[in-house]
Image (cartoon, grey):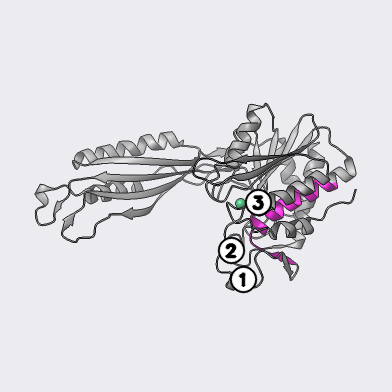
Amino acid sequence: MAVLSEVTIARDLVRCKSVTPKDDGAIGVVHKYLKKLGFKCEIMEFQKKGTVKIKNLYAKIGNSKPNFCFAGHTDVVPAGDIKSWSVNPFGGAIKNNKIIGRGISDMKGAIACFIAACSKYLNTHGTPYGSISLLITGDEETVAINGTKPVIEKLNRRGEKIDFCLVGEPTNLNTLGEMIKIGRRGSMTGSLTVYGIQGHVAYPKESINPTTTLVKILNTIKSLKLDNGNKDFQPSNLEVVKISIDNTADNVIPAEAKATFNIRFNNKHTSNSLKKKLNKIFSTVCKNNKTRYAIKYYVSGDAFITNANSTVDMVKNVIKKHTKRNPVLSTSGGTSDARFIRKVAPCMEFGLTTKTIHQVDENAKITDLKKLKDIYTEILENYF
Ligand SMILES: [Zn+2]
């Protein structure tokens, strides 16, 4: 069997215009290559009410334990202003030894390396004593409710076990080998509405201005010192991201005032402990100002960390060998699908660089793709 090329696969994937939540054949490309390699492939489609149907793929080779899983997403963010790109963002162009295209670093390049690494491994060693699986979703960049989360739940229901998972999200700031992610902060958004009594600004005694309460609340929650961080995590932080008072007249005290905030938090808190803390502030300040409030929370995920173990060490050493860098184990950055997978398996993330992701002319060096394929291949060799 010929060993598959990560460059060919990556370009095939970039040519699918899989701008989230569209698939445009991207899952099919992965399916086609893995089938060729002898993987048992299962397409899993999900469609929560009010969303579009999403295609996901779970593919596996081998039947015994342990099951090593590669995870990633084929959907990409929009290209933005196409005229600012130097090439067609969905053409798979190569320029100056780089593949340029939307999603090449985040994270079609890593998926191509998963597949090429599997083909190289299988070509040399045959089917492993254990199983290699790939969990590829088409729903990560937006709401992520028809993707990895329901796939994991379905696998869990039928007793399919994953023993270790490597997510191929871009983790390095500038150079391959700088950083491995072994956890993520939690993220929670709160939408707060404060209710007062509408009235004429000239007669404030007859009304209650909810804006006064809202400003006090926002000041209080922004001044909260949540923690100082710890050895694994940076300090938790709250940011107010939106304030809105729907009022078209200058002489009216509004009936309600709204604000939205987001908290990125470490493992010293849970979303529930934070809700408790915040709700207490809301009710105290509202009571003191004779206003009422309503709050809606959206939790993207709680904070988590994969504790140091032999696989984490092994992966770190493989990366060091191929990149001549000593990768930092980090929990920084935004959320990823690791937040769903970590509920069933220890998880770490290592992929390309974040330097050009979501930007015009997103690109990946061909030498980085080759290195990443070699790293993934050696991880498989050491794991089994
Ligand atoms: Zn991504």
Magenta stretch containing residue 2, yes or no?
A: no
Q: Give me the C-alpha separation between circle 2 and circle 3.
A: 14 Å
Looking at the picture, does residue 10 appear above or below residue 44?
below
Q: What is the chief secondary structure element of the magenta stretch?
A: helix
- Dot 3 amino acid type: Thr
Mark yes or no: residue 306 visible.
Answer: no
Q: Give me the C-alpha separation between circle 1 and circle 3.
A: 21 Å
Q: State the residue at coordinates (89%, 51%).
A: 2
- Tell me: 331 left or right of 136: left
Marker disc for residue 103: none
Q: Position of residue 275 (x, y in %)?
A: 39, 37
Residue 283, quarter of the rendered image: top left
Residue closer to the observer: 340 or 246: 246
For the residue labelled by badge 3, is the local secondary structure a helix, a strand or a loop? loop
- Dot 2 amino acid type: Ala
Residue closer to the observer: 152 or 65: 152
Looking at the picture, does residue 200 appear above or below residue 299?
below
- Dot 1 amino acid type: Trp
Q: Position of residue 351 (x, y in %)?
A: 68, 51
Q: State the residue at coordinates (57%, 40%).
A: 339
Marker disc for residue 74: 3
Residue closer to the observer: 329 or 131: 131
Query: Dot 3 surroundings within 10 Å: few (below 14), some, or many (20 or more)?
Result: many
Query: Where are the magenta residues, as a range?
Result: 98-120
| Residue at which label 1 appears | 85
For the residue labelled by badge 1, is the local secondary structure a helix, a strand or a loop? loop
Marker disc for residue 79: 2
Earlier along the polypeptide chain: callout 2 or callout 1? Answer: 2
